[in-house]
Amino acid sequence: MKIESQWVFECQPQHVWPHFLHAQMDSSRPLLFWFGIPKPMSCRVLEGVAAVGNTRQCTTDRGTIDQRILQLEPNRLLQYQMQQSTVWCREWVGKLIDTFTLEALDGNRTLVRRTTEFEATGLLKVLRLVGLWAALRQAHAYAAKNWRRLIAEGQTASMA
């Protein structure tokens, strides 16, 4: 199954890009996170430098998710695949691949497309698939909201 989202950010790609690799999320808790869906808290590259083969780790309020970087073109493309997780619902996921593409637009703007490909496994596979779809849709929106905040904070700091 696939989820596709896209957003336009009021900045150049190099201002969005770093937040895919290192970000600290806010303390808000959208609705689905109140029902036990893992809430993203932060992400970072464990090896310190983003490169194909390195590990991007997402920390949630329920554990960690380690993702192997498959493709990386700075300011243009990032793709990673979940390798392991300590999150309670890890047994539900057979495959999880995220792809981000950035496209510079006129007027100092950037179009970001995020595609998540995923499969559910185990008993009640169809119900798990629906649960994953809802959780990942919420995660897309929550991450984009935080990227906007981080970009605004970065632009304010650079103007000071």
Image (tube, rainbow, N blue to C red):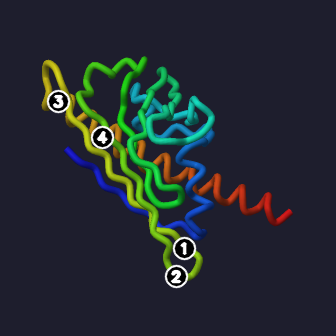
- Identify the residue under disc 4: 134
Q: Secondary structure at mark 1?
A: strand
The amino acid type of the residue labelled 2 equals: Asp
Give the quadrant of the N terminus.
top left
Whichever of callouts 4 and 2 sits on the residue coming sooner in the sequence is 2
Relative placement, left or right, of 2 versus 86 is left
Residue 159 against residue 146 in the figure, above or below = below
Q: Residue furthest front?
A: 52
**Looking at the picture, how far across and down is residue 124, in whole percent?**
13, 23
Checking the image for residue 109, the label placed there is 1
**Circle 3 residue:** 127
Could you tell whether 113 is left or right of 16 in the image?
Answer: left
Label 1 Cα neighbours within 10 Å, binned few <14 / some 14-19 / many ≥20 = some
Kind of residue indicated by mark 3: Leu
CB under 8 Å between discs 1 and 2? yes
Residue 156, by quadrant, is bottom right
Q: Secondary structure at mark 2?
A: loop
User: Reading the chain from its start, which is encountered first: label 3 or label 4?
Assistant: 3
- Answer yes or no: do the residues labelled 3 and 1 have beta carbons within 8 Å? no
Q: Earlier in the sequence, mark 2 or mark 3?
A: 2
Circle 1: residue type? Arg
Image height of 51 relative to 154, above or below: above
> In the picture, residue 90 is in which quadrant?
top left
Disc 2 and disc 3: Cα gap in Å?
43 Å
| Label 2 sits on residue | 106
Q: CA distance from mark 4 to mark 2?
A: 33 Å
**What distance separates the C-alpha of mark 3 from that of mark 4?**
11 Å
Of the residues under marks 4 and 1, which one precedes in the sequence? 1
**Element marked by disc 3:** helix
| Residue displayed at 39% across by 61% down | 6
